[in-house]
Image (cartoon, rainbow, N blue to C red):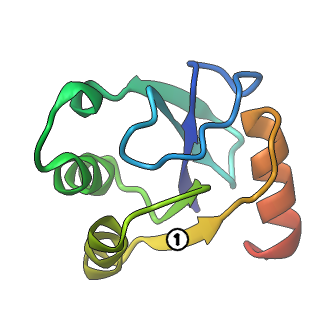
Amino acid sequence: MKVCITTRGPTLESAFERHFARAPYFILYDTRTGFSEAIRNGFVISDSRMGQNTVQLLKMNGMEAVITGEIGNNARDLLKGAGILLHMYKGTGMVKDAIDTILSTQLK
C-alpha cells in the first residue's frame, strides 16, 4: 500500500507533522517494498485550496492512505471522495514511529 505521512523534513527520521495540508513535507512510503521518497509541500504558503491541492497531489502520486494528526473537515471529505484512507496518529516523534504504529494497528 502507498501511504503518505505528514512530516517536517524529508526523511523517515524527520519529525512527524500533525497538520495535514500545512505539513512542510510529505513522505510517500510503500509498505510492500519499504521504498520512500519526500515531496516538499509547495501548497503550504497558499491561502486558498490547500486541502484540495494537497489531495490532488496525493492522488496523482497513487497514494492509497494518509497518516496525519489533524485534518479539517473539507480535506477529510476530499480524501474520502478520492478514495484515500485516513489514519490518525496522535503520537509524537519521527515519521518512522508513526509508520510503525499505524502498520501494527491499522494497516494489517
Residue type at numbered disc 1: Leu
The picture quadrant where one finds residue 97 is top right
Question: Where 23 falls versus 102 (above or below)?
Answer: above
Q: Secondary structure at mark 1?
A: strand
Is the residue marked by circle 1 packed among few (<14), some (14-19), or many (20+) residues within 10 Å?
some
Question: Where 10 falls versus 18 (above or below)?
Answer: above
Q: Residue at x 49, y 26 (%)?
A: 38
Q: Residue at x 69, y 54 (%)?
A: 32
Horizontal placement of 79 versus 64: left or right? left
Residue 6 at what x, y percent from top left?
54, 41
Q: Residue at x 13, y 50 (%)?
A: 49
Residue 77 at what x, y percent from top left?
30, 78
Q: Which residue is mark 1?
A: 86
Horizontal placement of 20 versus 44: left or right? right
Tell me the quarter of the image containing the N terminus: bottom right
Question: Where 93 falls versus 59 (above or below)?
Answer: above
The picture quadrant where one finds residue 75 is bottom left
Frontmost residue, 28 versus 73: 73
Q: Residue at x 53, y 55 (%)?
A: 2
Tell me the quarter of the image containing the C terminus: bottom right
Horizontal placement of 3 versus 22: left or right? right
Residue 76 at what x, y percent from top left?
37, 72
Q: How many marks?
A: 1
Frontmost residue, 15 versus 59: 15
Residue 27 at what x, y percent from top left?
54, 35
Horizontal placement of 41 versus 2: left or right? left
